[in-house]
Amino acid sequence: MIGPPGSGKGTQAAVLAAKLKIPHLSTGDVLRAMAQSQTAEGLELHRIMTEGKLVPSEMVNKFVLISLQSKITGCILDGYPRNLEQAKFLTQNYQGKIQAIYFKIDKSLVAERVAGRFSCNHCGKIYNRYLSQPMTDTVCDKCGSHDFLFRSDDNLAAVTARLDAYTTETEPVVKYYTTKGLLKTLRADRSVSEISEELLSIVKSH
Ligand code: AMP
């Protein structure tokens, strides 16, 4: 799944994984968990991610390959490959079939969607400081929890850096899979259900 931050690829990857009962590997989720550790590696990861930059490919390639090799059913890769180095690594080291799905959306639409995003740490409901606050500032509308979770890279400066990284490093991956004839494009500026229906039919016809 390839697309700019805020294109909805994470949401769709989770829906598709549940429908098809196949594993979903979000490299962002794995790296966020690794960045919690108070080791030199964890602190360095936290710094890179908070700045909205990409983590070195050697680190990501290693755990993606190990994870793919252990999954006989295949896997939904969400947020990987993120640059040409990773795309070529995947081609050279993975023998299974690859289908790239591109979540196409105007980049000017996504900054506001992502900046200010936060979620309930208890039930997962997603809010946005600019677009959809809970009715009471400190209480989740859905479950009543007071515990909210903010991603440290969801502020405007970091989102801008993530969009820049997307433009310079990830857009060439879209071209790479187009040239190989392996890319399908989805219009990502539609409702979650419209997109998931089309996504399912693309994947089933592959
Ligand atoms: P995401 O959850 O996909 O938005 O990723 C959050 C952050 O994790 C990114 O801004 C990067 O710092 C890092 N990251 C996720 N996937 C990759 C990847 N494939 N290569 C390098 N860095 C990544």
Image (spheres, rainbow, N blue to C red):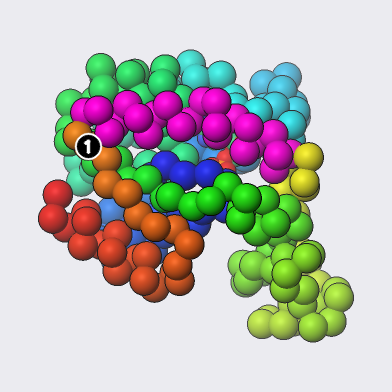
State the extent of the magenta-drawn residues as a range: 158-180
Q: Residue at x 56, y 19 (%)?
A: 56
Q: Is residue 172 magenta?
A: yes
Q: Is residue 145 above or below residue 49?
A: below
Q: Is residue 43 left or right of residue 191?
A: right
Q: Quadrant of residue 53?
A: top right
Residue 31 showing in the rendered view:
no
Q: Is residue 162 left or right of residue 102?
A: right
Q: Amino acid at mark 1?
A: Leu
Q: Quadrant of ligand 1?
A: top right
Residue 166 image offset from top left, x and y in percent: 55, 34
Type of secondary structure dominating the magenta stretch? helix
Residue 72 image offset from top left, x and y in percent: 20, 41
Single out the residue that lies furthest toward the right.
Answer: 137
Q: Is residue 149 left or right of residue 181?
A: right
Residue 68 showing in the rendered view:
yes
Q: Residues within 10 Å of mark 1 (few under 14, many from 20)?
A: some
Residue that carries the numbered disc 1 in the rendered image:
182
Q: Residue at x 33, y 19 (%)?
A: 88
Residue 108 image offset from top left, x and y in percent: 62, 50
Name the residue nearer the viewer: 196 or 18: 196
Residue 143 image offset from top left, x and y in percent: 68, 81
Q: Residue at x 43, y 35 (%)?
A: 80
